[in-house]
Amino acid sequence: MLLKLSASVLLSLLSALFVHTSTLAQVKRVKIGVASEPASAEVQMKLKARFQHLTANTADPNDHFDEGIYSPKSAIFTPDGKKFYINSLEGFSTLVYDATTLKRTKIISHTFNSSNQSLFLNGETTAFDYAFKKRTKDQNYFQGKPVESCLSHNGRYLWVTYYRRSYDMNAQDPSAVAIIDTQTDEIVRVMPTGPLPKMVAASPDGRYVAVTHWGDNTVGLIDVSTATPKDFKYVKHFVVGKRLSMDFSDTEKIDRDKECGYCLRGTTFTPDSKYLLVGRMTTGGIAVFDMQHWTYIGLVTGMKGSVRHLIIRGSDVLVSTNSSGYVHKLPLKTLLDAKVAQTGKDINLVWEGCFAGNGIRTIDSSPDAEYIFAAVNNESKIAVIRTSDMSVIASIAADSFPVGLAVSPDSKLVVVTAQGKSAGGGNSVMVYAVEKK
């Protein structure tokens, strides 16, 4: 039996569906020149330029059509502030931009075939005891999906992690990390990693690089104390809680953003390089490792759950908690004194914090640690937080949906990536000018 609907009822249903879909998507694009609010805030931001892979017909000369922008994940400036890099996840590439002229200068491809197998030292394919589930040969013929990055050797080398090798549908095989010489912007070596590495961090003393595996609750520690990339080598395999076994289907797509144990992400060394801090995104807390003895000494909690990103600026540890939308602050000395005094135990501390918006992703701060900038994914905005009293003092609209964020060394620019979701958005990199009153 067919259900007959009047034209008015049908129109109402279609209108309701359209409104629901539009509300769900919340996709927006902001105009070049948009300014932060309120206008009276002590920090002002303005959208200065954009690189996007959406339309070539732009109304503003600073709105650049850039085919290299394809699901941009993260951004990072060189220490001198002259360049910044964008990791284009689905474009299998890292893009290089001149921070003064705001022009793209190069595309670094993460495609590996017979022409560049020499980048894999002695043909190495794996680290520790990780095994490939299906592929028995040509493991190093793939495209890498670049996620995050860090700099080592005073900015000489850029380390770029791959979410997965292109043939590894469920990110359960060993992945890899590329080492790029920033003087030439060429890959000089590719090292294998565990499954699904996301964050990567270099110790301030120049001795180690830590690769955090979102895929199985582990961290790989690489000795980089030599100046020569071919001599870099793994020296330790840390485990947070229990190492997960990688045994997913080869025919059914698994959501590895959820099937990831503790989903280890935010990673940083303390300024004296004596400790490594690793955030747990699913159950919360920060796992602490003693780098002098290469041991896990326990968990620090007290912040709201879902730790996504953490940095150390000035004397404080700064943490973004994705699901709660909070940004937290705790004196580093307080954290370390309490943790070292209770080695082997999990401790709960009182953190200062503020709500900055739904779905906080990456945070960064000005070098003087006076202000924190937070990418608020679900609300498509950037929040500015005054560190001294942890209060939100300003915000500015962003293309949907912002994920990565980096502040220039002189604090005058903030670069933000909009990766997008299934609802739309993304394929945009925004460059904001910052001015303090």
Image (tube, rainbow, N blue to C red):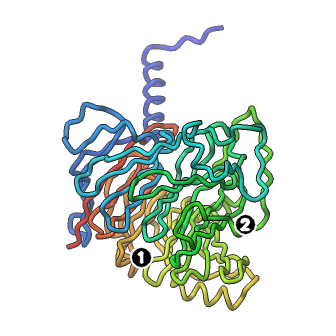
**Residue occupying the point 47% across, 13% down:** 6
Q: Quadrant of residue 394?
A: bottom left
Q: CA distance from mark 1 to mark 2?
A: 36 Å
Q: What amino acid is labelled 1 in the image?
A: Met
- Measuring from the top left, give residue 137's x and y in whole percent: 73, 37
Local packing at callout 2 (Cα closer than 10 Å; few below 14, some 14-19, many 20+) is: some
Frontmost of labels 1 and 2 is 2
User: Of callouts 1 and 2, which one flags the residue occurring earlier in the amino acid sequence?
Assistant: 2
Q: What amino acid is labelled 2 in the image?
A: His
**Residue occupying the point 33% across, 51% down:** 97
Mark 2 — residue? 237
Left or right: 193 as drawn, with respect to 331 = right
- Measuring from the top left, give residue 433's x and y in whole percent: 25, 60
Left or right: 144 as drawn, with respect to 424 = right
Mark 1 — residue? 390
Left or right: 15 as drawn, with respect to 42 = right
- Measuring from the top left, give residue 9's x and y in whole percent: 47, 20
